[in-house]
């Protein structure tokens, strides 16, 4: 039996707020049940922040919304002990979702299908309303008070839930900060109207990417003094690579093979997986007599398209685990068997996946997307090299250079691990987060006055 409750100590409780309309939108896309999310999932923004804040002595409640609960429910994340508070979606939002099948779409046709005339106009209005209707505002405000939260961290500031967080924070006198996890534009007219006011009214923005900081400062007047550079954290103790020969023996990969690795959510366009396959095809043509292996781990909405593309190209050496891999040791073993980590994305926030590769001693070859230039701040001296986006030839050439020079590969790998250890540890990031929140007005609960009000969350 594991049980946890809040309000019985002297440290603050911070609300972490998932940006997605419904938690199941994310979980269903990667084939993970809520029970698996609660009991097995680690890493990422959610659990990375939970662990970093815990290392700094701050408790967290992770708030999510679901259409699969009728009343607020508390669960305990088995691996961190954090409370997951699941709030029920509103009736209005459920009604909107019956007409708007994809509320994250950027056009009415993508959101509601081929509708015309009055129906199209009606669906356009619903699409604008959906992001704001997704947050059960009154319920969320009551729950923040119920848990005596002293600050709110919203996962992504370029989403409607952040706007609500700022308003609720103002009403409850709570500091509100948003982080950058990939959202770099407002998707609807209503968001574009309201977002500047939310940015001005918030207490801070956590932006690791220098490129994104410049965009925000240019786009939103009054935001210059709000931004802080704090990297996404990584539990480095879980990402120490095993000896390469041992990892390869376990996976049945020959010692003399040249191996590249990628892991993450399968989104063909965003993650640039078509570019990665183009680059791999070029490598295979350039090295017909070399044993080349490409390890892919992950699944997502575009898994069918990825599988079809691999089959149509008849690519050799591609080994794909088409499922969401929750076991970090499985990912670590595959990374340990590789010679280089490859990131081919067209768009990112601040990706953790390449840092996991770096922690395992892998050099990184990556496209020059947001966040990567900050991870590899000194280029090869940080353990990797950058190539232009949408350029399969440049990506293939950079991978080939790492493959062809064993000494260069080893040096980059050593530098990559050193960079990961120095910049992305839980302790370092946790201290930065705590200092930032306290600077922006978070106060600890030193009175114990709310100890009797907090719900006890139990997981058997």
Image: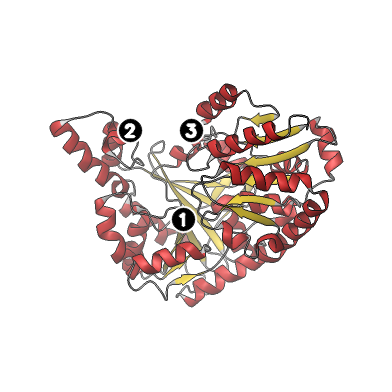
User: Which of the pair 437/10 is nearer the observer?
Assistant: 437
| Residue at which label 2 appears | 101
Q: Vertically, is 323 above or below 60?
A: above
Most extreme residue toward the front is 286
Q: Quadrant of the N terminus?
A: top right
Q: Separation of disc 3 and disc 2 at Cα?
A: 14 Å
The residues tagged by marks 1 and 3 sit, at their Cα atoms, a distance apart of 21 Å
How many discs mark residues in the rendered view? 3
Residue at image position (69%, 49%) is 357
Front residue (pair 185, 399): 399
Residue 2 screen position, x and y as percent: 64, 47
| Residue beneath disc 3 | 301
- At horizontal 50% and vertical 38% (from top left) the residue drawn is 267
Helix, strand or loop at label 1? It is: loop
Q: Is residue 152 above or below residue 136?
A: below
Label 2 near label 3: C-beta < 8 Å? no
Mark positioned earlier in the residue sequence (2 or 1): 2
Name the residue: 58% across, 35% down: 278
Closer to the camera: disc 3 or disc 2? 3
* Quadrant of the frame with the C terminus: top right
């Amino acid at each position: 039996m594991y049980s946890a409750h809040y309000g019985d100590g002297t440290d603050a409780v911070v609300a972490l707020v998932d940006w997605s309309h419904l938690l199941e939108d994310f979980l269903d896309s990667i084939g993970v049940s809520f029970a698996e999310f609660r009991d097995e999932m680690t890493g990422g923004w959610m659990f990375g922040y939970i662990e970093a804040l815990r290392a700094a002595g701050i408790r967290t409640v992770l708030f999510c919304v679901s259409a699969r609960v009728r009343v607020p429910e508390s669960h305990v994340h088995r691996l961190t002990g954090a409370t997951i508070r699941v709030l029920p979606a509103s009736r209005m939002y459920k009604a909107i979702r019956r007409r708007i099948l994809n509320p994250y779409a950027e056009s009415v046709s993508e959101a509601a299908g081929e509708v015309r005339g009055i129906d199209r106009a009606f669906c356009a209005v619903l699409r604008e309303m959906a992001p704001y209707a997704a947050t059960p505002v009154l319920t969320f405000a009551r729950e923040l008070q119920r848990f005596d939260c002293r600050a709110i961290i919203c996962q992504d500031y370029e989403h409607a839930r952040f706007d609500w967080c700022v308003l609720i924070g103002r009403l409850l006198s709570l500091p509100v900060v948003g982080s950058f996890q990939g959202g770099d534009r407002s998707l609807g007219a209503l968001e574009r109207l309201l977002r500047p006011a939310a940015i001005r009214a918030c207490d801070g923005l956590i932006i690791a990417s220098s490129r994104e900081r410049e965009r925000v400062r240019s786009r939103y007047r009054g935001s210059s003094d709000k931004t802080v550079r704090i990297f996404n954290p990584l539990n480095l103790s879980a990402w120490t690579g095993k000896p390469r020969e041992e990892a390869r023996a376990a996976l049945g990969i020959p010692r003399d093979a040249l191996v590249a690795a990628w892991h993450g959510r399968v989104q063909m366009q965003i993650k640039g997986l078509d570019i990665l396959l183009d680059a791999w095809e070029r490598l295979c043509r350039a090295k017909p007599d070399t044993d080349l292996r490409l390890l892919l781990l992950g699944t997502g909405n575009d898994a069918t398209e990825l599988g079809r593309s691999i089959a149509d190209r008849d690519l050799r050496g591609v080994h794909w685990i088409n499922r969401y891999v929750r076991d970090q040791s499985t990912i670590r073993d595959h990374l340990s068997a590789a010679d280089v980590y490859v990131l081919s994305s067209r768009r990112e926030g601040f990706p953790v996946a390449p840092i996991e590769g770096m922690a395992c001693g892998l050099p990184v070859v990556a496209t020059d997307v947001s966040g990567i230039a900050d991870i590899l701040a000194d280029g090869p001296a940080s353990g990797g090299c950058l190539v232009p986006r949408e350029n399969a030839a440049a990506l293939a050439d950079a991978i080939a250079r790492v493959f062809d020079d064993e000494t260069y590969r080893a040096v980059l790998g050593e530098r990559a691990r050193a960079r990961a250890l120095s910049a992305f540890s839980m302790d370092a990031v946790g201290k930065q987060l705590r200092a930032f929140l306290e600077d922006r007005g978070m106060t600890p609960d030193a009175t114990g006055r709310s100890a009797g009000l907090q719900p006890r969350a139990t997981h058997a």
